[in-house]
Image (cartoon, helix red, strand yellow):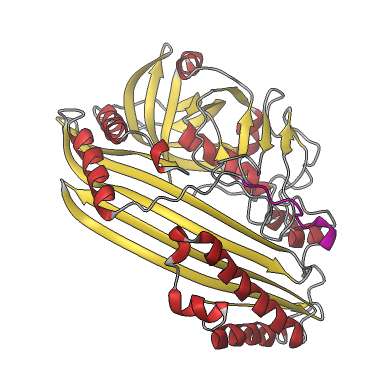
Amino acid sequence: MSRVDLLAEGGVTGLLDDPERENELLTGIARRMLDRAARRGADQAEVGVSSGLNREAGVRLGEVEVLEEARDRGVRVTVYRDGCSGSASTGDLRPEILDQTVDRALAIARHTQLDPASGLAEAELMATSLPDLDLWHPLDVSMDTLIRRAQEIEQAGRGGDKRISNSEGASVSAEAALSVYANSHGFLGSQRGTRYSQHCILIAADDSGMQRDYDWDARRRFDQLADPATTGREAARRTAARLGVRRMPTGRFPVLFVPEVARGLIGHLVGAVSGGQLYRRASFLLDSLGSRVLPEWASLIESPRLPGGPASSAFDGDGVATKDSALVAQGILERYVLGSYSARRLGLTTTANAGGVRNLRFSGGGHSYDDLVAELGRGLIVTEVMGQGVNLVTGDYSRGAAGFWVENGEIAWPVEEITIAGHLREMLTGLRAAGIDHDERRSIQVPSLLVDEMTVAGQDA
């Protein structure tokens, strides 16, 4: 029986107890499909195969509400022939289905239009060094362990403040994933990683009404997750702090974005300088290479090979080798965010960003949160934004928001149902200060950011 046959029968049960064997099985699938694509006339081909295991337990008011174990596997193949491309995917890894999937991709390619930008990234750009990035920390966490931890989190949260009146629950999950990418240049790279997370949502009430908020954490290692009591108590603190909502004035004020929200601002910048927006000429940062997009004291540095990073990888989605580089240096846009396809459309070279940025960190500022609040003086702290009012074509920004009003450099009271508006380029270049409280749990890592001035429509509008 072939390795492919074994995988089709055995599923992903070996992912935790024998990842090396699992990797061999996925590699066998990738090679089989590349061989078939070549025999059937493809000029080039690429294959991605993945195998994953996820367990999650959720509780509410101490009772188990969610128990889920998902074992996923899948493959996607893209073929290139005579300047045309076709893709197909399947979750059925039986050999005959794999062969049919390749044939479907070839059939699709015969009916697509010629696209001179299509094709694999250049062979000389493929990753040749695949170091261990400390992403794999497997632990066979039982459902009982997940349940107990979720109950501890919720219990700590419900006891964290006497005004906590209800709970939307707490959950804990454990995930392990392994993937293989191969193409007809002869490149074959495998990646494996683990991720553990926990989450708690609480409801508080008093004479002013009811409020809802949450806290969460995610790490590569289970033993590095925040203590259950810490997550529960922080969810309680955040929720109770939102009680006592009052009105605020309408006008032009400085706005302080906390890290979870500030990440979105930098995410909009990344989106605006990404290949798809640029070659469609649908970005407010068209032709901005070499121009100022952040203050002189701010930079954005990408570290895709950061050991243990949330988005670390030795190669991008095209197999191109990743490396540390500045996206923005001292406020100046140094490059775009490109995969091989978008790079060709723009007449440029890939920046190894097929699949997005990896461990992009905001650098500069260095103020404590209390210092930022004091610097804010009179204005708004934004802890939550709502709605889809961001236009990357024009740069216009208008979102519903909630947070806290600040008077004389001190938090005065919570606010909600307000609107903040501005233009992204002015907001980003007009940053007054930045914190040291980076949120390191995601691929874009940003601290609190103080925007010099925005239009704020308060509840008295």
User: Which residue sits at x=52%, y=83%?
Assistant: 94
Q: Is residue 132 positioned above or below 68 on the image?
A: above
Q: Is residue 245 above or below residue 82?
A: above
> In front: 115, or 233?
233
Quarter that holds the N terminus: bottom right
Tell me if residue 111 comes above or below residue 365 in the rendering.
Answer: below
The span shown in magenta is 122-132
Q: Residue furthest top?
A: 408
Residue under the point 49% across and 14% down: 371
Quarter that holds the C terminus: top left
Residue 80 to residue 122: above or below = below
Give the dominant element type of the magenta stretch: helix, strand or loop: loop
Q: Position of residue 254 (x, y in %)?
A: 51, 23
Quarter of the image holding residue 203?
Answer: top left
Residue 129 lies within the magenta run: yes
Residue 176 in sight here: yes
